[in-house]
Image (tube, rainbow, N blue to C red):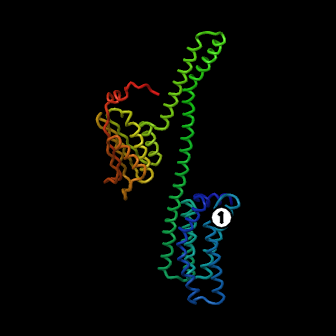
Amino acid sequence: MTGRLERVFTFGRTRGRGSRLRRLMGISFGFMYLAYPVSDIVTGQVSGAEAVWQSVALGVFVVTYVAAVLSPGEHGERGRRTVALMALATLMAVVFPLVFRGGWTALPIYVTVMLSMALPLRPALGAMAAMALVVLVDCLVAGAEIGTVLLLVMQVWTLGILFASVRNTRMLIVQLEDAQREVARLAASDERLRIARDLHDLLGHSLSLIVLKSELAGRLAEQGSGRVAGEVADIESVARQALVEVREAVTGYRQRGFSEELDGARSALGAAGLTVTVRVSGTPLPGGLDGLFGWAVREAATNVVRHARATRCKITVANDGTRATLDVTDDGVAGPYEPGSGLRGLAERVRAEGGAMEAGPSPGGFRLRIAVPAPHAADEDSACDTGVPAV
């Protein structure tokens, strides 16, 4: 039974010392309700031994409450301690108003906030109902006015729902961070396997051929044959070709093409819960613009996921042979806009290609648009055919 309680109470706890501090800061505003029992003691409405008992009880409740909020809530001994602290705080919030009455009837509100942050939604709703009933009974026993009773019951429900929503939001953030880390880990693993496979395909045949020709050259050299020079020349040629292929492969890994970045952006936006629409028209992008548009799509998708809080994203690419355009729009929150280093670097690359970039809030959200002159394929071929051998 204790283990099941531990799993319930620790569900949704955010990680680390910083998260516990934020949790305390978020809940501690409710200490303003302690003004009621404190004022009874300070103003002299309660005096003598009863004032001493109330002061001690108030201190014990505050210490227990803070300890429960800051408890790490892990399994094992720490998890059992968390459950015990929460149970003790709840018991004091139920009993103290019956014993001391007066301003103590607000104590169940503390427990409501604490349990709303610690429990899943359904148990939290049950805890809210239980605390509302406790407030009602305590107020009736204390002879409180009907207006005070209704106010406290309403605060139990409103604060409970508010902090249950906060807890649910933090849970979603934690799950999203876990998913992003797992996606990054899997992507890195897949990329390593792909590089290993491609390098094996590139070098396996070449190295095998080099080994065979080296052995043949060695035997020919022992026989004094004149074919040794030819075999050595073949070895050199194969080695140079393998070097060129490896360099091309490494260059391809460092700069992904537009189609790969478009697939990656679609996957990232879809994983973030956005509806993605992609429209591509016209001729394929020339080689000089393929990397630029790939970078632009990656930067735009990153900004949408991180900052836009959007639900839909539309990516439009067009190339009529003379001008290539990329338009990325979303329906996110169009707040104050300050371009980051990624967009500034993209704008510099676009200008270097003779194009123009527009980025900023639009009537329906945010828009990024680049337009770059697209050289004809014949122009690219003539520019590349310089007569200079590749190195």
* Residue 261 relative to residue 54: left or right: left
* Residue 203 relative to residue 335: left or right: right
The residue identified by callout 1 is 82
Give how far across and how far down residue 234 sits, in percent: 55, 17
- Front-most of 95 and 293? 293
Q: Is residue 95 visible?
A: yes
Which residue appears farthest toward the right when viewing the image? 77
Residue type at tag 1: Thr
Say which quarter of the image contains residue 78.
Answer: bottom right
Query: Helix or strand or loop: what does disc 1 sit on?
Result: helix
- Front-most of 32 and 126? 32
Name the residue: 57% across, 15% down.
231
Q: Is residue 100 above or below residue 279?
A: below
Say which quarter of the image contains residue 258.
Answer: top left
- Front-most of 342 and 270? 342
* Residue 180 relative to residue 50: left or right: left
Label 1: few (<14), some or many (≥20) within 10 Å?
Answer: many
Give how far across and how far down residue 49 sits, in percent: 66, 88
* Residue 45 relative to residue 265: left or right: right
Give how far across and how far down residue 387 sits, in percent: 38, 24
Give how far across and how far down residue 156 sits, in percent: 52, 71
Q: Quadrant of the N terminus?
A: bottom right
